[in-house]
Amino acid sequence: IETDKATMEVEAVDEGTLGKILINEGTEDVAVNTPIAVILEDGESEADLASFQTPAAGGNGEAAAATPAAPAPAAAPPAPAPSPATNGASGGRVFASPLAKRLAKQAGIDLAQIQGTGPHGRIVRADIEAFQTGAAPVAQPTAATTPAAPAPAPVPAAAMPGEAEFELVPHTNMRKVIARRLTESKQQVPHFYLTIDCEIDRLLETRKELNNRGDGAYKLSVNDFVIRAAALALGKVPAANASWSDEGMKLYKTADISVAVAIDGGLVTPVIRNAGGKGLQTISDEMKTLATKARDGKLVPEEYTGGTMSVSNLGMFGIREFAAVINPPQGTILAVGAGEQRPVVKDGALAVATVMTCTLSVDHRSVDGAVGAEYLAAFKKLVEDPLTMLL
């Protein structure tokens, strides 16, 4: 199932054999609780699918049974209600979903005592829960089986006069979400920007020495140092670790750093939880794992939601300086440029240093200018004196 950030595998609750696919792969905007396939239980075969009727979306969310549909009445009066599941006294089979059977077995309930309200009297989870609470199950009306009219095919976009020839590529869910959220961010969040230059020669030396000592067990990157410094700076300036809400200001107790990762068709931001409480090697290992999962589309929601601040690093592309768009509901995002040798003045004399420009985009509703400046000063001090990150 494709979400806004990843493609996820969802395991079926029921057990059985896949008998029929109802929703084709790649179909967009499928409503929640719409049946997507039919599962054959023990004793059922493909022959039972001949008279299968596709139920409508909604209801109790149980998988549909591949049980033959009741014949339509010839007379005008309304069709009779679905017959209840046969009980043990009559010696017939009790029709129940695997989930209902499992719940009944765990609760010690005899399924023969329960009247099913699912398709064709099948016992479903809601019936088990109603029986346990003593509430009488209410039969669900049989959904109309007339298939919905197919949506009209999209009309190809026509080229404007003088416009170059183009190919129209449909938007993915991820691209739609990115466009909507960032548009809302620039329209609703009052951005302001603070920029600072950090000399990183000592950081590069520390990184090289630590990697040499690792003998290949790990390979720290400049970005790993940036992530840890960003988190530690939030600990030194907790007022910057905040976000706006209508109910009040959210002041976070841990520094969870979202890190932008470019993938085909978009951008995801896996989160390093409590980055200030983790060592550089742990941050490096977690970042490599999350980046790989992001590019493979295997991130789960808890791995890319809930960060308190974002870091976006385009230094590897040679970008010297840029300003990033805040990812709501977060209050800040740090844009990191490339480290490059630049002329600097030290003690009145001209010298050369490796300088990295960083720009902090700030939501002025939650973080004031002075707080943002204090945060960047703490970040710069950590980056320029990397041994303090190891304390």
Image: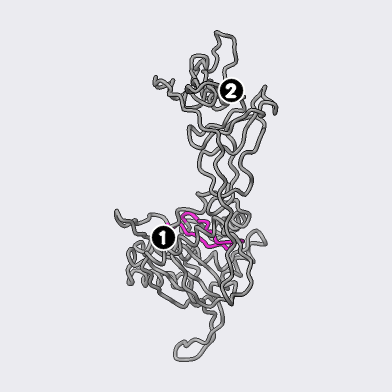
Q: Residue at x 59, y 9 (%)?
A: 91
| Residue 10 % position (x, y) | 58, 41
Q: Residue at x 52, y 51 (%)?
A: 303
CA neighbours of label 1 inside 10 A, class few (<14), some (14 to 19), many (20+): many
Residue at the spot of label 2: 71
Q: Which mark is residue 330?
A: 1
Which residues lie in the magenta part? 255-274
CA neighbours of label 2 inside 10 A, class few (<14), some (14 to 19), many (20+): few
- Would residue 309 be found to the left or right of residue 285 on screen? left
Q: Which residue lies most toward the top here?
A: 89
Residue 258: say if magenta.
yes
| Position of 249 relative to 139 (above/below) | below
Q: Residue at x 49, y 17 (%)?
A: 109
Q: Which residue lies most toward the bottom here?
A: 349
Residue 108: say if magenta.
no
- Asked where in the image residue 375 lies, by quadrant, the reply is bottom left
Q: Is residue 331 visible?
A: yes
- Going by the numbered disc 2, the residue's amino acid type is Pro
What SS does tag 1 mark? loop
| Residue 150 % position (x, y) | 57, 46
Q: Residue at x 42, y 69 (%)?
A: 361
Q: Nearer the viewer, residue 26 or 5?
A: 26
| Residue 195 % position (x, y) | 43, 76
- Going by the numbered disc 1, the residue's amino acid type is Gln
Tell me the distance, in whole angstroms, between the alpha carbons under discs 1 and 2. Answer: 57 Å
Q: Nearer the viewer, residue 84 or 360?
A: 84
Q: Which mark is residue 22?
A: none
Q: Nearer the viewer, residue 122 or 156?
A: 156
- Would residue 16 be found to the left or right of residue 236 on screen? right
